[in-house]
């Protein structure tokens, strides 16, 4: 396979080796070394730092379809990882063009320097359109990204590593992305000229289960009037209920939901059975479906981007959403007491559900808009409305 680029005459200092043995040459950036993962593509035009710090990408190498990545530099405000000890779990980044100097007043670092500080390997000079077309045609491949400034690579060992990596099916990555102990959250969303704020309390006590949660999700929960306590992915129903929550939030996260569900589904089932208002997104949505008797499946190429149209059956409106998932809920597997509330207008796949007899709902996409449009912020009010009704009764 040939994925040509404009810098093909320059000696390669980085390689992207696919599991079928294909070798793509480019120029290295960020950290040196090698890393193995699943290669996906993201179609977002902005918010690359939020994407690169989203724990849901653990185990993946991100190919950006937009060519100009890095132009606004990097800073310490746009990081989405909550558990800094886990960094983000992303294995590498694939770019079309080399990184230019930052052109934003908010930048504090060059993206290349920032990648080095997070031990992330990058490769540029790649025809990302051709690589994206390959993924769309054949599905997400596994591969190895390698960066050596001297251009010396053990190609045979890289091919063995790429072919031997088992992939994300069956992998529980949430425990690594999650916090290891409970902690409160009080930060509120960023405002122009003010930065982030602090909440002094809230009307609703919410327990957020951290499977790889993003900071802006927690900020929007706080802004909606929630007093948030974050618990680890392995929290039991008893540990959750000990906080006497008005509601439970099931977060985004990486890996195979069926694998994470071995310990999380029993907890979710108990919470739902007790009628606690529950809101899930992304991995939380998938595991809620499993807890309700549904099934999940691995997608051909997944959904990764900030421009995905979703139809909301409950409002009759179309919203443009931010997505990042390689597994999906099988809508046909949902039981009678669960309604499909949202569908993707790209491929008709399930993007939301709600129980007909309990205050429980979830969506597949990321409503926190970090990065991405703000069309879905209403979901946080939908959650607080459910808690308000439950408190009143």
Image: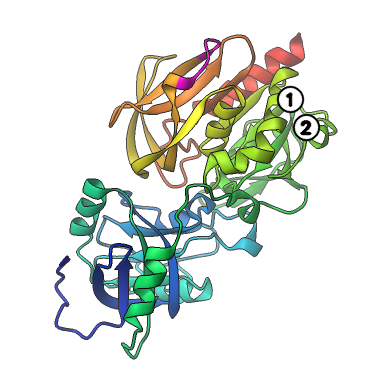
Q: SS at mark 2?
A: helix
Bin the neighbour count of mark 1 within 10 Å (Cα to Cα): few under 14, some 14-19, many 20 and up.
Answer: some
Point out residue 150 in the picture as x, y percentages from the top left corner: 34, 91
Q: Can you identify the residue that label 1 sits on?
A: 270
User: Magenta region's main secondary structure?
Assistant: loop
Whether label 1 touches label 2, CB < 8 Å: yes
| Quarter of the rendering occupied by the C terminus | top right
Q: Which residues are magenta?
A: 333-338
Left-right relation of 340 to 79 = left
The part of the image, by quadrant, that contains residue 66 is bottom left
Please state if 140 lies on the left or on the right of 382 as rendered.
Answer: left
Could you say where residue 324 lies in the image, as x and y percent from the top left?
A: 43, 44
Quadrant of the rendered image containing residue 122: bottom left
Q: Residue at x 59, y 39 (%)?
A: 251
Above/below status of 216 relative to 383: below
User: Which secondary structure, mark 1?
Assistant: helix
N-terminal-most mark, 1 or 2: 2
The image quarter containing residue 85 is bottom right
Left or right, residue 197 beside residue 64: right
The circle drawn on residue 391 is none
Q: Residue at x 43, y 42 (%)?
A: 325
Residue 331: in magenta span: no
| Residue 377 percent across, percent down from the top left | 49, 31
The disc at residue 237 is: 2
């Amino acid at each position: 396979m040939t994925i040509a680029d404009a810098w093909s005459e320059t000696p390669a200092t980085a390689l992207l080796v696919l599991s079928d043995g294909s070798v793509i040459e480019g120029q290295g950036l960020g950290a040196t070394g090698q890393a193995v993962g699943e290669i996906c593509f993201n179609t977002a035009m902005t918010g690359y730092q939020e994407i690169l710090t989203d724990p849901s990408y653990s185990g993946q190498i991100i190919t950006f379809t937009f060519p100009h990545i890095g132009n606004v530099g990097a800073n310490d405000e746009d990081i989405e990882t909550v558990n800094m000890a886990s960094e983000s779990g992303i294995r590498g980044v694939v770019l079309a063009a080399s990184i230019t100097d930052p052109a934003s007043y908010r930048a504090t670092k060059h993206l290349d320097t920032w990648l080095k500080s997070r031990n992330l390997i990058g490769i540029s000079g790649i025809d990302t359109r051709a690589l994206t077309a390959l993924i769309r045609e054949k599905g997400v491949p596994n591969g190895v990204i390698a960066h050596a400034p001297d251009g010396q690579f053990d190609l045979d060992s890289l091919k063995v590593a790429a072919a031997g990596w088992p992939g994300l099916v069956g992998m529980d990555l949430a425990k690594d992305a999650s916090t290891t102990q409970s902690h409160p959250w009080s930060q509120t969303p960023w405002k122009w000229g003010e930065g982030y704020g602090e909440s002094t309390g809230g009307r609703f006590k919410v327990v957020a289960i951290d499977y790889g949660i993003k900071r802006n999700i927690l900020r929007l929960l706080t802004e909606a009037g929630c007093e948030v306590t974050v618990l680890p992915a392995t929290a039991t129903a008893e540990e959750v209920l000990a906080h006497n929550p008005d509601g439970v939030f099931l977060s985004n996260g990486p890996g195979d939901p069926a694998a994470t569900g071995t310990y999380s589904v029993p907890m979710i089932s108990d919470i739902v059975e007790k009628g606690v208002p529950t809101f899930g997104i992304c991995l939380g949505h998938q595991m809620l479906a499993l807890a309700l008797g549904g099934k999940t499946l691995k997608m051909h190429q997944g959904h990764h981007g900030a421009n995905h149209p979703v139809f909301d059956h409950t409002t009759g409106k179309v919203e443009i959403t931010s997505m990042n998932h390689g597994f999906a809920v099988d809508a046909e597997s949902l039981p009678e007491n669960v309604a499909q509330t949202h569908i993707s207008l790209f491929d008709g796949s399930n993007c939301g559900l709600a129980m007909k007899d309990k205050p429980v709902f979830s969506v597949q996409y990321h409503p926190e808009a970090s990065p991405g449009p703000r069309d879905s912020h209403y979901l946080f009010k939908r959650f607080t409305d459910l808690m308000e009704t439950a408190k009143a009764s």
